Image (tube, coloured by chain):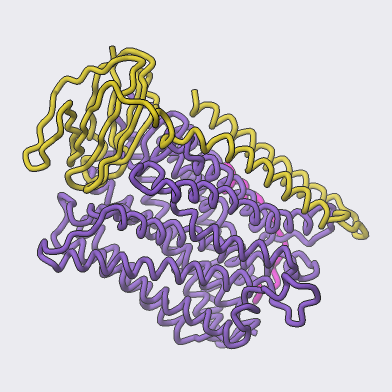
Amino acid sequence: MASIKLNKITSVWIISVLLLFIVSIVLGILMRLNQGEMISQSPITFYSNMTTHGLTMIGIWFVAGMAAVNYIMERYVKTSYTVNVLALVLTVIGILMFWASTFIGHFHSAWTFLYPLPFKEMGSETWATLMFLGSLTVLGIGWLIWSISLMTQILKKYSIPQALAWQHLRKNPTVETPPFILISMITLIGVIACLLAAVVLLVLFYAEYFSNGNFVNDALLMKNLTYFFGHTIANEMLYLGLAVIYELFSEVSGRPKWKTTWYVALAWNCTLVFILTAFFHHLYMDFVQPQGFQIIGQLASYFASLPAAGVTVFSIFIAVYRTKIKWSLTNLLFFIGVIGWVIGGLAAVIDSTISNNIVLHNTLWVPAHFHTYNAMGNVLFSLGFFYWFSIQFSDKTKIKKSTTLTLALLLIGGIGFLLAFYIGGAESIPRRYSIYPSELSIGASLATIGAAFASIYFIAILIFFFNISKRCLKILFSSS
Amino acid sequence: MQQQSIFVLFLVLAGIATIVFTYIFISSKKAAAEEKGMSNPLKKRFWFSLILFVILCIFITATIPKSPYYLFADETPARVIHVSAIQFQFILSEKAIDPVNPSGESHIELPINELVEFRVTSLDVNHGFALYDSSNRLITQVQAMPGYVNRLRYKFKDPGEYKILCLEYCGMAHQVMRSSFMVN
């Protein structure tokens, strides 16, 4: 049972995430409006906003997943409240430092800060790069401590083979590992691995920064490290959401709790291997990368879909198909989120095919697919948790007509916004262009359409924000 | 064109996924309290996973040999063009480019239906070297990475002006970094 302190800190996480989400959406819409030539930003402003938008989004949906997992994990093991607070404080400090580097210092190397661009920016303040690296260090320390703390708590109760549910691969296991613990453990291993890669990356950045030209990094190694970190954390935050779904979908649907079976255990252990090797697909167009890694990239990207579809998605099918379940906003958001995750995954698998990637890489197809499984997948997983969390202390659980309308706005806005990206990708429109050249003017039209639909999505998010935050504030300021 | 086929394939797959999920959702809404859901779920899960596995294997077998690393790998290029990318321009030359005093040729003409090899590097940050045909369609690309030379091989099938755009974000003037050459 969650303590009052845990309820309160989870409320703070939820309100903070939603507030930052609103700011980030506004930045995203401004970017699309600029690309559509409806407003005029300087390139530096555009790219600084792009950097803020990207890293803030990654950061908030990662911590949203972590806060949700932390909250539910209390059902199985004791978690550290102090570490939870420390992670919150360091996240706030890190975000403020990061925003100072972009909004004031005009740091604009994108959230991927691909080496050596942060050292060769033009037009930003001289301190901005160091402030940016410092902000990542603060965020990384907070998140690493949080992840290690949660994993340590799991390992106090379960041995490593038990936490990974290996006993379920044999007949008649004596100890049962709940699916939530298994998925959390698998995800935390991935999170810790990618955060450690980020530590190495940052150390190498600092080493060059302070070497006065005596030390120069290898660009290929730095790119591998960047995407091992960036790709993995962006995907692990989805798995944090899935851990929550495994725990809550059956519960809110009034159905028996999901159990770990041999195929669930096998699927999630395979997922760990695939998720840590799929990042190679970000380097397909670097022909100097060893070819074995390129092939591993495609194989891992393809086969990552097998456990996801065969186990998680199929489990949702089984749970819902011809089964009378109690539909609420929570499981509806989870269900729609899984559709978004699947469709985004399909687009990702298409892009992870090397022979397709050569005409899709760094076009709008890339933001198309990751916005699909984030904006219409992971965000919905987290909103489902936020809503469930906020109403568990009230009795208003019935779906109202206004809620259906909000969902409709979310879907219409989301689909239109994403289609503008997909069509742009099919039309060879480059990503990360502040404005488009005249021969690619269709990119500008698509951007305007995208901004219009994103505004509809934004209205839905505002409604969710007000409803959920109102209840979270009550929890925060209540005495029990 | 490849991009259009990809887009159609995606729409079909996304449509199938949406229909399946909608059908399953409706089946739940219509279900009576005593209905028992899916029969033989383990067997169905097995077949679903097996079919997916076979489809993935077919796609892997069909697509990996078409990867750019293997295209024209055994042929000798008729022309070699050296490319150095630098914020925010492309330098193209038939001769090797001096990284200290980089200079190239302002006008490059390439032959049609003959193998051309671009030896692409960067003198500062990562850039993209993306070729667009006269109908503004991305036809091939490679990255320009400092300290490395990526070799991109291509046979141009149509004459005309081809544009080079930077497809790896490289800073404040990334969107105007471009060049072009003629194919005759």
Q: Nearer the viewer, residue A400 or A205?
A: A205
Q: Position of residue A234 (x, y in %)?
A: 46, 58
Q: Number of marks in the image?
A: 0
Q: Residue at x 28, y 46 (%)?
A: A46
Q: Residue at x 61, y 65 (%)?
A: A269
Q: Residue at x 35, y 21 (%)?
A: B133
Q: Is residue A458 visible?
A: no
Q: Residue furthest right?
A: B34
A312 to the left or right of A58: right
Q: Quadrant of residue A112?
A: bottom left
Q: Is residue A362 above or below residue A214?
A: above
Chain letter for the purple part: A
* Magenta segment includes A411: yes
Does residue B127 lie above or below A6 as drawn? Answer: above
Left or right side of B15 for A213: left
Write down the quadrant of residue A72 in the picture: bottom right
Above or below for B132 versus A65: above
Q: Please provide percent x and percent y for residue A97.
A: 27, 68
Queried whether the magenta region covers residue B76, the answer comes back as no
A228 or B69: which is nearer to us?
A: B69
Residue A466, percent from left and from top: 52, 62
* Magenta highlight range: A392-412
Residue A236, position in %: x, y? 51, 62
Q: Is residue A28 visible?
A: yes
| Residue furthest left in the image | B101
What chain is the yellow one?
A: B
Q: Quadrant of the C terminus of chain B?
A: top left
